[in-house]
Image (spheres, rainbow, N blue to C red):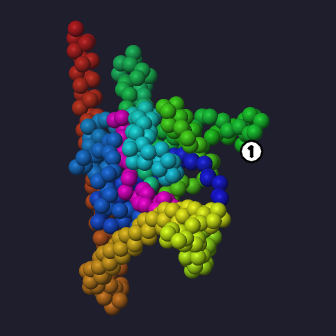
Amino acid sequence: MAVKKPDMSCARVVQYKSSGLDKIYRHNERRNQSYGNENVITEMSRYNIHFKDPGDETYTEIFMRLEAEGVISTRGLREDATLLDEIIIDVNTTYFEDHGGYEYAKKFYEEAYHFIEKKFGADNIVSAVMHADELNTEASERFGKDVYHYHLHAMVIPVVDKEVRWSKRCKDPELRGTVKEVIHQVSHSKKWASNIPETDEHGEVILRANGKPKYRKSYSILQDEVYEHMISHGFTGFERGEKGSTAEHLDTLQFKIEKDKERLSEIEGRIEQTRLQYEPALDAKTRYEDIDSLGKKNITGKVVLSGEDYEELTSLAKEGLTSRTRLWDMQRTVEYYRDGFERYSTRYENLSKKYEELTEKTKPFLDAMEHFPELVTAFVNKLKDLFRDKAAREQAERERQIAEREKKRAERLLKNKTRGIER
């Protein structure tokens, strides 16, 4: 019997620039018609739980609104800078199955969301949703029912408080060098800067080649913080994810290959176990003949059993009851796989239909690409230029709005200062 692996927590961070926000918005908020992850069961998406709902706004729209309202500042931010960080928190699927399933997962991730509120600030969270619609095929096969992998996606704005001081050119000498205002600056690098030295097994600080301390990665610190927070709030029974390990739901080819190897090995073991359990059924005919020959009828017509025959009969009766229970279990398993086959057959048919429709819609483009590749390439490049121009105009408009706010703020400060002098 295989030793059960310990349940592990995982917390990781994914950075998103402006160009990637729409795609992750559609994925997290389930706004797509279909998904690259074939285990997303859209019929189950109604069970996803929002702890912070973006409403009718996209992630981009929320970011731009907060910027326009002066809640956050992009002053000095590069055009290709990180705007949002995605915090993904999860634990092995079996952990939730062993602790109450969906209801337990809701409580677990609600507390995880409170941790994110505390670390990043509630106002800086754009969205936080627990996904409950991604089927874990390996666990489903093992448990003989549909089992879903629960995990949390939180989109946060990496914000740090920055003091803006009056410059030396300020006309009022008393104001020079003092704090003019505190802005909430968007900065991924500053938000995730680490000042905790890394130590070896003896507790000694590890130094770089230049003699300066080597600092722990902030994402590793996040793993510690999530684990400690959840344990302190009563959610136990799992361990902190190992350093360098991959999350259970990572959608990489190598990870899927490794999981398939594990599942294959487990299935082979299950087949062998089933063969050993039901091998006695091969001599069922002999057993039937043995039962028919048990006992002898007396004068009254009653069957009289010897002590040996009685023990044999009770033994066979017990085997029969045990086999009946096993057969029921097998029947349920067969029904589960039959339902799964029908479900996946339907999904395959739907995907095939969508593929045919997409092929039909793109046929003119593909034909044009085959016969006039230079013209099509020029057309696509022109579209890219148009989209870049559109993005540049939007950025210019944001900068204009920010400059307008700064101008009005400076005018108010000057007006207040003038009033103070007049008094």
Residue depicted at x 38% and y 62%: 40
Residue depicted at x 32% and y 56%: 45
Q: In the rendered image, which quarter is residue 334 located in?
A: bottom left
Total numbered labels: 1
- Magenta stretch, residue numbers: 122-148
In the displayed structure, 282 sits above or below 224; it is below
Q: Which residue appears farthest toward the right when viewing the image?
A: 202
Q: Is residue 147 magenta?
A: yes
Where is residue 300? Give x, y as percent.
Answer: 50, 69
Where is residue 179? Give x, y as percent.
Answer: 40, 23
Three-letter residue code for mark 1: Ala
Q: Is residue 52 magenta?
A: no
Viewer-nearest residue: 203 or 375: 203
Quadrant where the N terminus sits is bottom right
Q: Which residue appears farthest toward the bottom when viewing the image?
A: 371
Viewer-nearest residue: 173 or 420: 420
Residue 406 visible in this rendered orientation of the protein: yes
Q: In the rendered image, which quarter is residue 365 located in?
A: bottom left
Left or right, 190 with reference to 1: left
Quadrant where the C terminus sits is top left
Q: What kind of element bears circle 1? A: loop
Q: In the rendered image, which quarter is residue 360 located in?
A: bottom left
Left or right, 361 with reference to 333: left
Where is residue 160? Give x, y as percent.
Answer: 44, 35
Viewer-nearest residue: 398 or 415: 398
Where is residue 275? Give x, y as percent.
Answer: 60, 72
In the displayed structure, 112 sits above or below 255; it is above
Q: Which residue is mark 1?
A: 209
Q: Which residue appears farthest toward the front when viewing the image?
A: 299
